[in-house]
Image (tube, grey):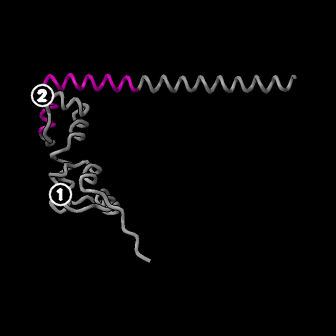
Amino acid sequence: MSEKKPQTMKPATAAQKLGILLEAAPEEFQSTPVSRTELAALEANPPEWLSELRANGPHPKQVVAAKLGVSISGLARGEVTEPLTSAEIQALLKQPPAWLVTERATQFEVREEQIRVKERDAERARKKAHAERFAAQNEAAARKRG
């Protein structure tokens, strides 16, 4: 019987899961498939290079967008196409350009709408469940009477 081969992922996938820019990682990481066990070990006990990348960047666009409080599309509209370092992100936050102010406002509105829709749907579900309970109670009472 042969030993089961550990499940691995491409370095790009592992970098995405770790929230780092693959091109900024060490060559060894970039060129070697990563097992789930290795990924868990990196997350649990990050080496110096990983801690440094997470703290200072350069960061991939999804991390940049999150740190700036905008969507990835918002970054594109703001013509931010390159990875940014933490210092560059902080500089943008301290003196936000017009596009960033607009995109943050848009993102805020989107989140507010998502909350409103979620609350509306929860209220509808609550009312539906209440109506179903009421109907079931009426049906049971009718069976008892009749």
Assign a secondary structure to mark 1: helix
* Rendered residue at 24%/26% (across/down): 104
The quarter of the image holding the C terminus is: top right
Residue in the foreground of this view, choosing between 138 and 105? 138
* Rendered residue at 15%/60% (across/down): 27
Query: Furthest residue to the front?
Result: 1
- The crowd level at tag 1 (other Cα within 10 Å; few <14, some 14-19, many 20+) is few
What predominant SS class does the magenta segment belong to?
Answer: helix
**Image spot of residue 142 (x, y percent):** 82, 22
- Position of residue 145 relative to residue 60, above or below, is above
Is 45 displayed left or right of 53 in the figure?
right
- The crowd level at tag 2 (other Cα within 10 Å; few <14, some 14-19, many 20+) is few
Assign a secondary structure to mark 2: loop
- Position of residue 1 relative to residue 121, above or below, is below
Magenta segment boundaries in residue numbering: 88-114
Q: Which mark is residue 95?
A: 2
Query: What is the three-letter code of the residue carrying label 1?
Result: Trp
Query: Furthest residue to the right?
Result: 146
Q: Which mark is residue 49?
A: 1
- Position of residue 59 relative to residue 90, above or below, is below
Residue in the foreground of this view, choosing between 12 and 123? 12
Residue in the foreground of this view, choosing between 32 and 51? 32
Q: Which mark is residue 39?
A: none
Task: Based on the picture, tell me whether residue 17 belongs to the magenta stretch.
Answer: no
